[in-house]
Amino acid sequence: MANPFDVDARRAIRMAIALDCYENDKVRIVDPEISGHEWLVATHKGLFAVGHGLAKLLLHGWFFGICRHGDELFLFENCSLRDRSRTNGRIVRLQLMDGRLVNPAVLAKHLDANCHQLKVIDERLCLVDTANQAILRFTLDGEAVDTKTPFAIAPATDRSGAYLHINSIAQI
């Protein structure tokens, strides 16, 4: 059976749902159960639990970053999808309890949609802002702390070598 919607219509529907979730602080949990799986994988098609030849969708969304810290899971979600003119990126936190993802909360919003990795360093939640070549730092409750700029801001179209497309960090 053919899909009743063309690609552009499906994208428009996904965008409308993503924007509604962003504006109303919704997190679209499909299945909170993670028992029996080995890893969580963030993708542009959602958050998946995988392992032992199994994969299942846990959350709808377009996720670029994921970090576990104790019993908390932090995710960066791009709610702008392919529209880079919007700053509809957000950080979502879920708790891991008894093999389930529970208590979803939106911690920070109005972030560039082209952020990537999340990492907890020195009890600060660090988010790599790829588009702006910066590291945004937050408390574990989502309060902005500061911004570190290891490289000068440069447009993605830069041909001088100044735009480095930073996307990951690690503590030394």
Image: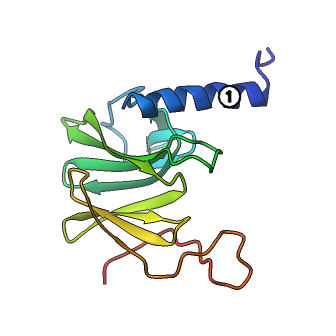
The residue lying at 19 percent from left, 48 percent from top is 71
Q: Position of residue 170 (x, y in %)?
A: 36, 75
Residue 98 in view in this figure: yes
Q: Nearer the viewer, residue 33 or 138?
A: 138
Q: Position of residue 85 (x, y in %)?
A: 62, 49
Q: Position of residue 4 (x, y in %)?
A: 77, 15
Image quadrant holding the N terminus, namely: top right
27, above or below 135, in the image: above
Residue 140 appears left or right of 46: left
Left or right for 83, reference 151: right
Dot 1 amino acid type: Ala
Q: Indicate the position of residue 138 as horizontal and vertical percent values.
A: 27, 60
User: Between residues 53 and 157, which one lies in front from this camera angle?
Assistant: 157
Q: Residue at x 70, y 76 (%)?
A: 158
Render colour scheme: rainbow
Give the vertical position of 145 relative to 79 (above or below).
Answer: below
Residue shown at 64% from the left, 45% from the top: 83
Residue corresponding to mark 1: 12
